[in-house]
Image (cartoon, rainbow, N blue to C red):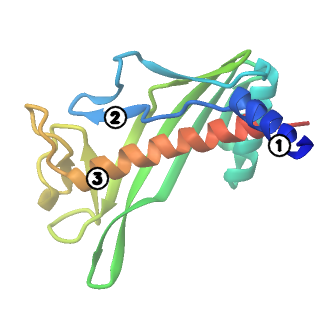
Amino acid sequence: MSASLVGSEMCIRDRFLSINVSAQFKATKDGLTTEDGKPYYVVSIEGKTAMDLYKGVNSYVLSHYKNPDAVANKMEGEMINIHSFDSEAFLLSKVMGMKVYGEIDMNLVVYFKDNRIRFDIPVINKMQADKTSGVGKDKTEYHFSGGIGKFMGSASLFNDKGKVKDKKFVEELEAYINNTIKEISEAAKGYTE
């Protein structure tokens, strides 16, 4: 009986410390947005001070980036701006046995309050992938809308009416960003001194 009581206490504690991270950001022809239209997404993490959450996210930055001091601008206990470049953010395709990855250069600003983390909409500085055909540059630069065409090295994810033109890139971009936020949130949740 005491074993089931311990299990129940652990279940209650885990529920108390659980975090709610769902699909936070989605791509549109105008850029990234949230489902509710707010320019940020908030993750609640009960039982953690703003400083605990800050230290947890800072620990994530220290362990996930080769040069963490160059990647993150910080206001201790209040905010971390993570500027990251990932040359293999997600697999887009395989062409004649070679893997083509989406590359992402972005800024993600994270703010801290007791029991919650706020993620501003990520700023995408550049999205690109190796070109598989065409002229000019060896990379295709992607835009949310307004690109002139993959063949010329500049592609759009959406047409002017908002219809998806490159479903794979859009899905992988959203998954990459939302998974990054989930990883950061989990690091903050699990942080202990």
Q: Position of residue 177 (x, y in %)?
A: 46, 42
Residue at left 29%, top 66%?
Answer: 138
Q: Secondary structure at mark 2?
A: strand
Q: Secondary structure at mark 3?
A: helix
- Tell me the residue that label 2 is attached to: 26
Answer above or below: position of 37 versus 123: above
Q: Who comes first in sequence, dot 1 or dot 3?
A: 1
Q: Position of residue 131 (x, y in %)?
A: 25, 66
Task: For label 3, count other residues whose C-alpha is less than 10 Å away and answer few (under 14), some (14-19) or many (20+).
Answer: many
Q: Secondary structure at mark 1?
A: helix
Residue at left 72%, top 26%?
Answer: 16
Q: Who comes first in sequence, dot 1 or dot 2?
A: 1
Marks 1 and 2 close (CB-CB < 8 Å): no
Answer above or below: position of 104 versus 88: above
Answer above or below: position of 18 versus 120: below
Tell which residue pokes out farthest to the bottom in this image: 97
The CA span between labels 1 and 2 is 42 Å
Q: Quadrant of residue 48?
A: top right
- Tell me the residue that label 3 is attached to: 169
